[in-house]
Image (spheres, rainbow, N blue to C red):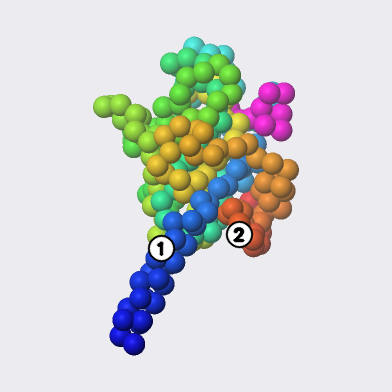
Amino acid sequence: MKYRTTLMLIILTVFLCGIVGLRAEVEIALEAELADEIVAPMIIADDRLASDGKFIWDDGEPLTGGGGAGYAEFIINIPEPGDYALWGHVIAWDGNSDSFWVTWQPADPDENAQATQNTEFRWGVGAGAAWHWDRINHWLDGGTFDREWDFKEAGETVLRIGVREDATMLDAIFVTTNVKATVAAQANVRLPTDEDRKIQIEGLAVDAKGKAATTWGSLKRAYQ
């Protein structure tokens, strides 16, 4: 009997480990222009090659530099605690139009990065004159390093993408618990679907892969 009990415990442990290993990643796709709040000089603009034909930026010609005011803010209801990474669908024309400020609360402190100029929150956007995916990073004085955010609880989070330079373009954001991916293909990034846009517009909880969405419209309305 003793050996049978031990065997059953071993089988149960292996089974549970298998379930954990097979757990689906959280994957959330957001349209930039559907942010809960967009503050000038960040504006919505049209581009037929962007997702759903629109993107956001601080309007300006490449090479002008500038920026430093305006932002887009997203209220994201994460379905489970853990480590998260962010990817942006972007265009960065040159070295004077290739950065944003990024804070994601409550993992980040309540800090106005545009005022403090804290490089912990500076995203050095990967260069490219066509739409492409770039993982949000720390652009520190010693180089760029992929960022991760550790959330202790499921629920409401607030992501702010702040202008740092004119002409840096943001089309979409992809949220994932796959923090180990270093290239877009590994992270399974994708643009928002009609269902993603419906969730974003109607104020439903973001949809984790394989999990049902729940309403959180009251939280969204509180920020409007």
Give the SS element for disc 1. helix
Please, which residue is most extreme toward the left here? 142
SS of the residue under disc 2:
loop
Region rendered in magenta: 48-57
Residue carrying label 1: 17
> What is the x, y in percent for residue 184?
50, 33
Q: Is residue 148 magenta?
A: no
The Cα–Cα distance between marks 1 and 2, rounded to whole angstroms, is 20 Å
Q: How many marks?
A: 2
Hey, what amino acid is under mark 2?
Lys
- Residue displayed at 67% across by 46% down: 196
Label 1 Cα crowd, 10 Å radius (few <14 / some 14-19 / many 20+): few
Q: Is residue 104 visible?
A: no
Dot 2, crowdedness within 10 Å: few (<14), some or many (≥20)? few
Q: Position of residue 175 (x, y in %)?
A: 52, 44
Q: Which residue is mark 2?
A: 211
Front one among 50 and 63? 50
